[in-house]
Amino acid sequence: MTLVRLLDVRAIGSEFASLRLKGFLMAAPPIDDFIAAAAKALDLPFEPAWQPAIKANLEVSLKLGNMVAEFPLPDTAEPAPIYKA
Amino acid sequence: MADDLDWANSADIAKAVASGKTTASAVTEAALARIAKTNPTLNAFTAVTAERARVHAKKVDASDKSKLPLAGVPFAVKNLFDIAGVITVAGSKINRVHPAAKADSPLIARLEAAGAVLVGALNMGEYAYDFTGENVHDGPSRNPHDTTRMSGGSSGGSGTAVGGGMVPLALGSDTNGSIRVPSSLCGIFGLKPTYGRLTRANSFPFVASLDHLGPFARSVRDLALSYDAMQGPDVQDAACVDRGVEPTLASLDKGLSGLRFVTAGGYFKKGASPEALEAVSMVAKALNAAKEIEIPEAARARAAAYIITTTEGAALHLDRLRKQAGDFDPAVRDRLIAGAMVPSTLVVKAQNFRRWYHDRVVELFKDCDAILAPATPTTAPKLGQVMFTLDGVELPVRANLGIFTQPISFIGLPVMAVPVPLKPLPIGVQIICAPWREDIALRIAHALEQMGVCAATQPKF
């Protein structure tokens, strides 16, 4: 199921899908579920045997990404690349 | 003649060709013979452009060689540079069905306009997502100081070819350390210029925010010669700045007078092996760099570089991951698939942090002209080695050989990697300067070379 389809299901009031989406957004889901959902949403097929390495890499990325995200910056902080017309 | 040229520098070759002592054709034939002889052992070249080289060498021989600063100098390029008539494989299996490149990279064209002679394309880690120099499709480029060890990557073939005496000059790319890591492990000099200095047009990208191109050589003068020939704006590369050529060769011999040096402590000492620390200490002592500073938030900078790399790399290869995932090097594929799943909020945060970090680090150059740091945490690991221990923690080699280079290229600072010839294996030190001050980095490296502290030593293999 793609992420778009998941949102569609929530929109028509499916309690199950709504709960799944709330879980997805509000609590840290098992990373295996996240990988499965992201792979479907991005149309990224992969072999089950690749899962452990993908999981290990994603765990490192999320850990490092959160290390960056927790650094306090003001709302006015500009990203490094600035587009100039 | 071949024996005479085995370890000759570009400057000496150009001088010999200009004076008529030898010819570009003779130098080219000697280089081709060396490559044929040593490539089965070192595995640096993936393509040899012999006929093209012979044609161009004849052209050089028919020219006014006094006007060609690199007359007859053989060089080779990482196989992500476009070479007209050659497929730009970028270390991959997937790209091998692409049509051959129609035009040369402008950097190749600029070197050839200065008289240099392209002799081939060099091995690299797949799609440049690598610090080891290993390649599942082409086999590893091997370290010339110990062929059972890694060359470093991703420009592994460039490090091997120059360090192994196959060519005196090579080009590579550096997104997170891919010039500086092979320079360190292979014991040669490498220059990663300021982000935006050298055009990346007609080269296969990896991470647009962080990709740089630059030269490898066995002497600082050779780096300056090639770097000066390659400078200049190029509208084909959106990141390439509109700056004129700022020559560095003339200032090489200015010495160290008036320059202030510091050593990076904290993060840059924590994971370093005794060899890496010894090399920095030797360079610091030679430069009288007594003061130690802390580059603020370097660990977080490395983390942010990691995030931008994995996500931009994933975006670049998304379609190939969807259609041809099985054709990637598994180690690259699994990281790219994971990169595709990293939330975009973290990427934006990384780019916000990048600007903050840039501003803090550039401030440091008010009180110094160069910062010294290790180039790699260790000397060359064994080929196939998956894990190593840094600061008591077991970590993957592939992702961690660049822990000291990533926080620097993350903000595009110019860096020289200089080789300290420790025994049994060499290791590099980074000389980090303020943006656009490649001239200072080269000048310091040249002084260290003159003092005998840094040198590319000839290996036996």
Image (cartoon, coloured by chain):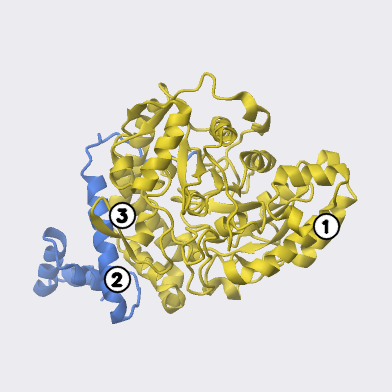
Chain colours: A blue, B yellow
- Co-location on one chain, circles 1 and 2: no
- Co-location on one chain, circles 3 and 2: no
Closer to the observer: label 1 or label 2? Answer: 1
Q: Which residue is mark 1?
A: B26
> Mark 1 belongs to which subunit?
B
Rendered image: mark on residue B344: 3
Q: Which residue is mark 2?
A: A53
Q: Is residue B28 left or right of residue B169?
A: right
What residue sits 39% from the left and 45% below the top?
Answer: B276
Q: Position of residue B233 (x, y in %)?
A: 64, 40
Amino acid type at image mark 2:
Ala
For disc 3, the neighbor class at 10 Å (few under 14, some 14 to 19, many from 20) is few
User: Marks 1 and 3, how far apart in space?
Assistant: 55 Å
Asked whether the viewer can see residue B317, the reply is yes
For disc 2, the neighbor class at 10 Å (few under 14, some 14 to 19, many from 20) is some
> Mark 2 belongs to which subunit?
A
